[in-house]
Amino acid sequence: MPGKPHVFTSNRVILPESDHPVPATILVDPLTGKIIDVKHGHTPHAAFSDPEAISAYTDADDHLIMPGLVDAHVHLNEPGRTDWEGFWTGTRAAASGGVTTLIDMPLNSIPPTTTVENLEEKRAAARGQCWTDVGFWGGVIPGNQEFPCVTESDLKGAMKELEGSSTVLCFHAELDTSSDESHTLSEVPNPTLYQTFLHSRPQSLETAAISLITRLHAQLPSLRLHIVHLSASDALPLIRASKRAGLPLTVETCFHYLTLDATSIPDGRPEFKCCPPIRDAVNQDALWDALKAGDIDFVVSDHSPCVAGLKKIEEGDLMGAWGGISTLGLGLNLLWTEGRKRGVEPRDLVKWCCEATAKHAGLEDVKGALKRGMDADIIIWDPEAEVKVTKESLNFKNKLTPYEGLTLQGRVLKTYLRGNLIYDASEGFAGKPAGQLL
Ligand SMILES: [Zn+2]
């Protein structure tokens, strides 16, 4: 027997079957946190002649009701590097930006998530601290406690092992094919210039790696393969060819590659450093085109913070700084601010940041869409509002981000996890951390 429903209604709801927001009403069972029904049409409060029949009523009026985002690529670094980020701060940052599920990456925490034992350690550290749901990726390494690069033979082994299983192999596609002998001391380039860093990670590193894995993939065509944080548009023809050949390949890019471009990055600002790097505007246009065409499947944050010292903020040292950009909580508004100039609709954002990411993480039966039987992970979002990114507005631990000072379009007004309010833009966080470990 379901409990008395919590009713969510709006004139603009993004439902899985429609291309545009429609008036709709969502009934949520407060006991299970599941959506029990979705009806077309906005429902005024007066329509419930017996107010006792419902447990709560939330009317978003003309604001959008949409599914919470599923961010499939986040580094929370706990345990071991909790001064970089942690479950508490990371999931609060996520909730404030409408993310209701995030999937933690296996590296940068100590230990990395490469064994079942280490996963249990992660889960123990996370328990009771999560404001959103959190899932965990596991990592493939050559059998020790560091996280070195895998070789072609490691990769082949892992690909063979996983072929035919439902597991997806995610691949950081940068392959260093250069030799280090090209520089003498006198010609070491200035490490505070963004261009110095950009030149050190050319597109060819990505295309070489993607060329290798797509070649191996062709020999193991039932393996689910995924390329994380694609930056190089030069690799798109390889990706298109693999997809056209019917290989189960998916590709993600990140908010920063779609919203920042190298020519407008100031020098001496390691907040902008990530690997692979943010490239020029021509590259960015090509990534947008590929995303719209479906060659790139979805968008994630790759939120990967560290402390100011390692980020070499004082020195402005791009070459020496830790590579990683802090984005949690900003992704939806970033993508919207840039995307609407390019004809993107809110529906596209749901496709790229909710539906496709949920599917990638194997959560498509519970997350990423507003329909019967799904978790009632719901956000109320005002696409017309503006927010200014200030240090005070950031909820992640180290307030170092390339987006500080920007004014973004869109504002998450409320975030609900399984029907329960967890974040309210005017009141702050609500309740206690009720996120589940998936
Ligand atoms: Zn990452």
Image (cartoon, helix red, strand yellow):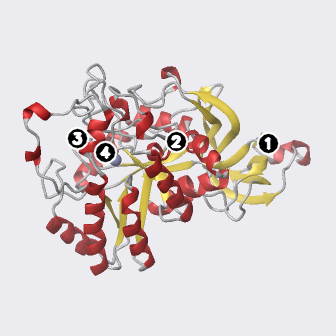
Crowd class of label 2 (few under 14; some 14 to 19; many from 20; radius 10 Å): many
Q: Secondary structure at mark 4?
A: loop
| Location of residue 74 by image quarter | top left
Image-based side of 248 in relation to 77, left or right: right
- What is the x, y in percent for residue 339? 60, 47
Q: Is residue 40 left or right of residue 392?
A: right
Residue 267 in the image: state x and y as whole percent: 35, 28
State the residue at coordinates (36%, 31%).
271
Res 305 seen here = yes
Task: Using the image, determine if residue 146 lies above or below residue 187.
Answer: below
Q: Which residue carries the number 1 mark? A: 62
Location of residue 200 with respect to 299 vertically, above or below = above
Three-letter code for the amino acid on which mark 3 is drawn: Ile
Query: Measuring 17% from the left and 66% from the top, which residue is drawn there?
Result: 152
State the CA–CA distance, disc 2 to disc 4. 18 Å
* Nearer-the-camera pick, 349 or 177: 177
Tag of residue 275? 4
Residue corresponding to mark 3: 110
Closer to the observer: label 2 or label 4? 4
Give the crowd class for mark 4: few <14, some 14-19, many >=20 residues within 10 Å: some
Q: Earlier in the sequence, mark 1 or mark 2?
A: 1
Residue name at image x 15 percent, y 53 percent: 178
Q: Are marks 1 and 4 in contact (CB under 8 Å)?
A: no
